[in-house]
Amino acid sequence: QKEVEQNSGPLSVPEGAIASLNCTYSDRVSQSFFWYRQYSGKSPELIMSIYSNGDKEDGRFTAQLNKASQYVSLLIRDSQPSDSATYLCAVKGNQGGKLIFGQGTELSVKP
Amino acid sequence: EPEVTQTPSHQVTQMGQEVILRCVPISNHLYFYWYRQILGQKVEFLVSFYNNEISEKSEIFDDQFSVERPDGSNFTLKIRSTKLEDSAMYFCASSDVIAGGGTQYFGPGTRLTVL
């Protein structure tokens, strides 16, 4: 069973639209959740972290966490072509620091 | 803004050779990590390091791999005898705490090519 799952995409949205990225995880004791953005050939870049159930907003980005459903999502409002990248969901347990990554969702924002 | 740096950006080596990948974590961070990403695949955890010892390692991190903090700033990953399947991007990351949030910041990576 995969530990962190994401739709691989590609997800294509028009410029200005809302992009919705989803992630599920298998370990119920997971405590911390992160969204990273990765451009091709580059390293993961942190976008958002979320630790409590509910929504967390930062500019055009909103992370949503539902621990009961073991589900975390990222909404990108007013999507821009520069948002085109692979978005990685990462999960950390309550002990130890290792991040477990999903396979990433490729997002394409069309002008 | 402080950042994690890594050298070299690209390393080409022959199968069976030893390589050392170098990282300089963010200066006030105490926890250090190595991850790798084979082309087209997900980012995979290799090892975490704290207080001059390994905290946790994955199944990938076998006897061919070792880590070291030789001085107050550098953090290295050594692969003793490289295999073709070691070809990947290797990312170093660091964080200031390990529990709870402990956001990890990634370096730009070293692309290792084993011929």
Image (cartoon, rainbow, N blue to C red):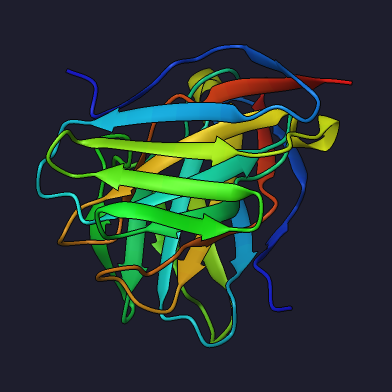
Q: Residue at x 66, y 35 (%)?
A: B112
Check the image and report above or below for A38 versus B113.
below
Give coordinates of residue B80: x percent, y percent. 47, 43
Give coordinates of residue B76: x percent, y percent. 53, 62
- Report the front residue among A55 and B47: A55
Question: Can you say which quadrant of the picture contains the N terminus of chain A?
Answer: top left
- Report the front residue among B20 and A21: A21
Give coordinates of residue B38: x percent, y percent. 54, 25
Residue B18 in view in this figure: no
Q: Residue furthest right?
A: A111
Image quadrant assignment for residue A89: top left
Q: Residue at x 51, y 48 (%)?
A: A62
| Left or right for A81, reference A8 | right
Question: Can you say which quadrant of the picture contains the C terminus of chain A?
Answer: top right
Check the image and report above or below for A92 versus B113.
below
- Report the front residue among A38 and A79: A79
Q: Residue at x 44, y 16 (%)?
A: A7
| Left or right for A51, reference B71 | left
Number of numbered discs on residues: 0
Residue B23 in view in this figure: yes
Q: Residue at x 19, y 36 (%)?
A: A70
- Report the front residue among B89 and A51: A51
